[in-house]
Amino acid sequence: MAKRYNEDFKNTIVDLYKSGESIPKLSDEYGIAKSTISGWIKNKKQITVDDNKTITVEEYKKLKKELAKIKEENQILKKAMAIFAKE
């Protein structure tokens, strides 16, 4: 069964990595798979959106998912409007 970690713990591990700790050392010390730590680091990586704005990969994925949901809802509304316009 997969172990769940809260966001504060993930952020702490990422901060430790950014302060110079190696992934193997963090893995050994906290008993977390290296691939799991690598994934957390990747998700917290900053992406420059424009001159003054950066977001994390994690935030980008959430925005992308939300956009897909909104597009789907928009298509449903368009189809409903077409049905009601016929009546």
Image (cartoon, rainbow, N blue to C red):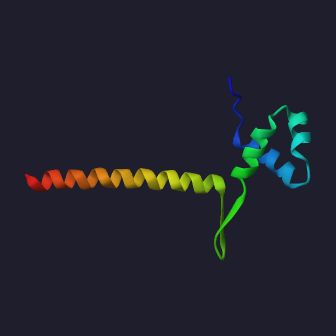
Residue extending farthest bottom: 51
Please determine whether, in this image, residue 15 is positioned above or below residue 2. Answer: below
Up the image or down, 1 lies above or below 20; here it is: above
| Residue 55 pos. (x, y %) | 65, 62
25 relative to 38 in the view: left or right = right
Residue at left offset 80%, top offset 49%:
14
In this image, 40 relative to 59: left or right?
right
Is residue 52 placed above or below 79 in the rendered structure? Answer: below
The residue positioned 90% from the left and 34% from the top of the image is: 28
Q: Position of residue 35 (x, y in %)?
A: 77, 39
Can you name the residue that lies furthest to the left here? 87
Residue lying at 66% horizontally and 77% vertically, measured from the top left: 51
Q: Quadrant of residue 26?
A: top right
7 vs 60, nearest the viewer:
60
At 58% across and 52% down in the image, what residue appears? 61
Residue 69 at x, y percent in the picture: 42, 50
Q: Quadrant of the N terminus?
A: top right
Q: Is residue 54 left or right of residue 10?
A: left
State left or right for residue 3 relative to residue 63.
right
Is 11 drawn above or below residue 33 in the view shown? below
Tally of numbered tags: 0
| Residue 15, position as x, y percentages in the image | 82, 51
Residue projecting furthest to the top? 1
